């Protein structure tokens, strides 16, 4: 009894990392996430090497999005019906083996197929991982566990994206002196490293012990039962106001916020006048903000209502987008994009924690699966639609400026009022609307959304 009281008094972070189940889950996530970000550049480079086509690279990203569109909701049913630990291990092993085929791939469609299969495994792995957290940590530690998990993802994004080439170079320097391993160097080193991370993750996950409720296990795959569970899950989520309005708010926010990725390069070049290289610094600044926000979310969530944090962070993210899109000063833009990253991290972590604390274990996998699929599909829609809107707006604005402004002043007005800027502002307004909707509809005190 005294030992339990002492355990409860220990700082949350210390208590979490004394939890072996959580430690192995976190370690597996960290190494595989690092490999994911290293391989992004490697797969894009491979596709471009095989095709010499920018369209082919864009098609690769489409194939990465398709599994979420086709299998996302069904993946959640599988997560809720089967042993989550074994499912995560199987996904890691399959991904590790699939990646080993990439160094020998000579056909671009083969790469597309591998990308599709890798993402299919990912949409099974992520909901299984997220749904497992409340099963291995106490309720009082869920927020901090989510904070650590998301911050780890953000850090590996920065490390993997910024230093991926350096990591590969170091491996080449080590392996290059060994007779057998010398043949494993070069661009293919990225694939071997990534495969190893998934294998290491699978090994770490094998040490986790999760409860095995009967609801997670079936004797055989019953497709009629999967269909019944799928529609039953949608029905339950539709009746739960918290989940319903949270997903709606996040969907609108993703549609608006995703425009930063598709229009950021144009905005950096035409408005901020920093060229394409400057866009890389903006993304790095966003990553720094995400890391800072990850730490902040773990602190403020202990003292403030999570529904209020969620809605306020969406509002602040939308306001940051509008402010970023309305200025032409590069240094100020960097500061604002860091602030945007802070709020983006807070809303993500708070959303996951609200789901963990308010959704029953029996449908938690389906909720997280729909969330993961929604993020991918809505982001893809945002990338496609925002570019079209920006092009249409640019042509309309140029015609309007040509009729109202004298020729010598037209370039100045075109740089200030171009399609990319107007579309980014519109995206920010959409995010603000999502924040207002969340503030109006999500009320955890009542356990449901407001009417």
Image (tube, rainbow, N blue to C red):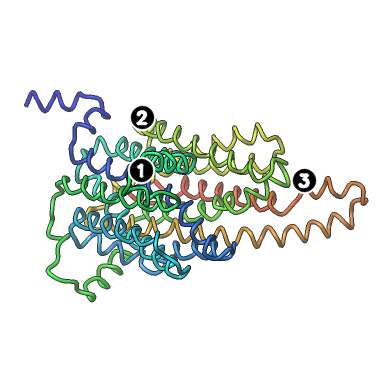
Residue at disc 3, secondary structure: helix
Question: Is disc 2 in contact with disc 1, using a CB cutoff of under 8 Å?
Answer: no
* Circle nearer the N terminus (3, 2): 2
The residue that disc 2 covers is 303
Quadrant hosting residue 403: bottom right
**Farthest front residue?**
179
Neighbour tally class for label 1: few under 14, some 14-19, many 20 plus, Cα within 10 Å = some
Real-space Cα distance between discs 2 and 1?
A: 50 Å
Name the residue nearer the viewer: 44 or 432: 44
Q: Where does the image place residue 216, in percent across and percent down from the top left? A: 17, 59
Mark 3 burial class by Cα count in 10 Å: few <14, some 14-19, many 20+: some
Q: As drawn, is 245 to the left or to the right of 79?
A: right
- Residue nearest the observer in this picture, 402 or 244: 402
Q: Is residue 184 left or right of residue 275?
A: left
User: Residue 345, labelled with which disc?
Assistant: none
176 vs 312, left or right, is left
Q: Nearer the viewer, residue 302 or 276?
A: 276
Label drawn at residue 175: 1
Q: Earlier in the sequence, mark 2 or mark 1?
A: 1
Work out whether mark 1 precedes mark 3 in sequence or the reverse, and give the earlier one: 1
Q: Position of residue 434 (x, y in %)?
A: 51, 50
Give the camera-side residue of 326 and 383. Answer: 383
**Helix, strand or loop at mark 1:** helix
Is 386 displayed left or right of 90 in the figure?
A: right
- Quick check: 330 above or below 400? above
Which residue does the numbered mark 3 point to in the structure image?
A: 416
In the rendered structure, are the residues bearing label 3 and label 2 in contact, judged by CB atoms less than 8 Å apart?
no
């Amino acid at each position: 009894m005294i030992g339990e009281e002492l355990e409860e008094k220990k700082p949350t972070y210390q208590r979490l990392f004394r939890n072996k189940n959580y430690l192995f889950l976190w370690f597996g996530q960290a190494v595989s996430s690092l490999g994911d970000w290293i391989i992004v550049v490697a797969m894009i480079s491979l596709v471009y090497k095989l095709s010499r086509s920018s369209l082919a690279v864009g098609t690769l990203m489409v194939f990465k999005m398709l599994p979420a569109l086709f299998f996302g909701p069904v993946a959640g049913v599988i997560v809720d019906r089967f042993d989550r630990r074994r499912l995560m291990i199987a996904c890691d092993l399959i991904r590790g083996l699939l990646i080993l085929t990439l160094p020998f791939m000579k056909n671009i469609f083969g790469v597309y197929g591998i990308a599709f299969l890798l993402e299919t495994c990912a949409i099974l792995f992520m909901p299984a991982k997220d749904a497992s957290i409340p099963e291995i940590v106490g309720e009082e530690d869920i927020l901090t566990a989510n904070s650590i998990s998301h911050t780890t993802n953000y850090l590996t994004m920065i490390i993997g994206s910024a230093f991926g080439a350096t990591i590969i170079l170091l491996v080449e320097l080590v392996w290059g002196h060994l007779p057998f391993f010398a043949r494993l160097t070069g661009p293919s080193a990225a694939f071997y490293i990534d495969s190893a991370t998934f294998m290491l993750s699978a090994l770490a996950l094998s040490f986790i012990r999760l409860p095995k409720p009967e609801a997670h296990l079936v004797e055989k795959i019953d497709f009629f039962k999967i269909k019944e569970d799928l529609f039953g899950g949608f029905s339950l989520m539709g009746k739960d106001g918290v989940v319903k309005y949270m997903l709606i708010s996040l969907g609108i926010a993703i549609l608006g916020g995703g425009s930063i990725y598709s229009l950021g390069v144009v905005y950096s070049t035409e408005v901020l006048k920093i060229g394409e290289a400057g866009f890389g610094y903006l993304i790095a600044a966003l990553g720094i903000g995400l890391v800072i926000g990850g730490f902040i979310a773990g602190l403020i969530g202990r003292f403030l209502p999570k529904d209020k944090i969620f809605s306020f962070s969406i509002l602040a993210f939308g306001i940051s987008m509008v402010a970023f899109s309305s200025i032409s000063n590069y240094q100020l833009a960097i500061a604002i994009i860091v602030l945007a990253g802070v709020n983006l991290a807070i809303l993500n972590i708070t959303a996951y924690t609200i789901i963990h604390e308010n959704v029953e274990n029996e449908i938690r996998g389906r909720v997280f699966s729909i969330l993961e699929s929604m993020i991918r599909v809505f982001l893809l829609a945002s990338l496609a639609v925002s570019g079209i809107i920006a092009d249409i707006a640019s042509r309309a604005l140029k015609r309007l400026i040509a009729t109202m402004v004298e020729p010598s002043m037209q370039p100045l007005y075109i740089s200030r009022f171009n399609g990319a800027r107007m579309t980014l502002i519109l995206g920010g307004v959409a995010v603000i609307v999502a924040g207002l909707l969340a503030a109006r509809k999500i009320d955890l005190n009542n356990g449901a959304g407001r009417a």
